[in-house]
Image (cartoon, rainbow, N blue to C red):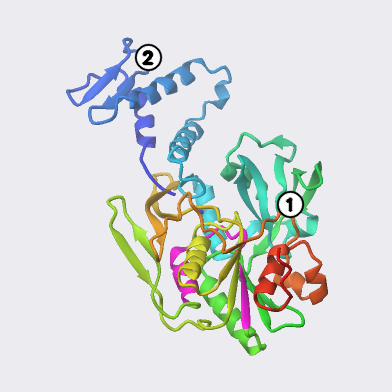
Amino acid sequence: MRRFIKITSILVGLVLLAAVTFGAGLVVGGTNLWQPCIVRTADQPAQFSLFWQAWNIVQQNFVDRQALDPVQLTYGAIRGMVDALGDTGHSAFLTPEQRKEQQSDLSGTFTGIGAQMGVKDGLPIIVAPLDGSPAEKAGLKAGDIIMKVDGEDVSALSLSEIVTKVRGPNNTQVTLTILRPKDEKSLDITITRGEITSPTATWSMIPDSKVALIRLSQFGENATDQMVQALNAAKAAGATSLIVDVRSNPGGLLQQAIRVTSQFLPDGNVMMEEDAEGNRTPFPVELGGVATDLPLVVLINAGSASSSEIFAGAIQDHQRGQLVGETTFGTGTVLQPFNLNDGSEIMLGTKQWLTSNGRLIRKQGIQPDVEVKLPLGTDLITPATAKTMTLEEIKSSEDTQMIKALELLKVLPETGN
């Protein structure tokens, strides 16, 4: 789930500018013309000189000279600036490698361990291992806190840097040292990386019922096509009501959010977009949805972000179904990519999303109609696991959010929880 400026060329030219006489358009700090100086153009804020001052101090005094990689220092400066905007989980700086990884993620095919990663309370965590992935097979669980990667402490690294370390070539191994809060112990888990083909939408019938469970893992390039296929297959199998699970769905493409949501709404707007001047642009439902009248419950949690929140907010605003679970992440900016000269890019939130009724998503999230909290690490029922269970086993499971959804759809009797 970012894009912004041009700083590299200024840094490359810094030493060349040190001994040059400047015209009226520049302000020069420092007194020794034979040392790198602090340079800013007259239209830049005075605080910009602090960056050059810090750059020069680091270049002249840091003890580990091999660490003075101008590319990495520049990337770090850009990343810090974007992070300081406070658009957590959305606006971000991507290196050329990270940009390629993001593109492969959205296509649904990549090499790695097959786990969604995120940040909670400042700590890198496993949001969810993908169904059938190397991560799931190795025993990684949602809520696991990542402490080390191949023995290296990653607590001070950004999430994107950790993701880069976890990923690697096919059939190679990576060892994660994780802390499992539920068990209050740390574990070393070795995982063999593989080619991950992540289906965006999976589904199965809940046993002994006419309820179809559809799991939407992200809003990637094929989200709408796979959702339509799942819905049509479910109806053909006799489904008369639906549970759509977007728990720990990090979002994805805006257009896919519009098209997926449109499968459940007959008319109206899916959402609105607001620019910095307060101008609002509605995004109408695309007519012809294939599941506009089936009773519906949507499962959400704190890992549901971005496009997932657009979907959940629209369902709630239109009173199309009930939301069960926990308040969503609260990421609601429109990301515009700004490509930088070396192939890196800034994903920058240039507008923000509102629900169709005008509710702000950013930093607010979408609150459930029925709140059901689950501890991190709880084993969630997925379409894959539902196929192997009886209704009684589901009723006795830890996934109380799923149980509540089945109660609301009259499959299970109300317990009052």
For the C terminus, the quadrant is bottom right
Left or right: 298, with 90 as reference point: right
Q: How many marks?
A: 2
Name the amino acid type tagged 1: Thr
Residue wearing tag 2: 35
Q: Is residue 252 visible?
A: no
- Residue 72: percent from the left, percent from the top? 51, 34
- Residue 267: percent from the left, percent from the top? 40, 78
Q: Is residue 370 covered in magenta?
A: no
Left or right: 284, with 231 as reference point: left
Q: CA distance from mark 1 to mark 2?
A: 47 Å
Q: Is residue 280 above or below residue 78?
A: below
Residue drawn at point x = 43 percent, y = 21 percent: 54
Label 1 environment density (alpha carbons within 10 Å; few <14, some 14–19, many ≥20): few
Residue drawn at point x = 33 percent, y = 13 percent: 30
- Residue 43: percent from the left, percent from the top? 23, 31
Left or right: 8, with 388 as reference point: left
Name the amino acid type tagged 2: Gln
The quarter of the picture where residue 387 lies is bottom right
Disc 1 secondary structure class: loop
The quarter of the picture where residue 408 lies is bottom right
- Residue 391: percent from the left, percent from the top? 79, 76
Disc 2 secondary structure class: loop
Residue drawn at point x = 79 percent, y = 59 percent: 137
Q: Could you say which is closer to the camera, residue 104 or residue 123?
A: 123
Label 2 environment density (alpha carbons within 10 Å; few <14, some 14–19, many ≥20): few
Which segment is the magenta one? Answer: 241-262
Residue wearing tag 1: 172
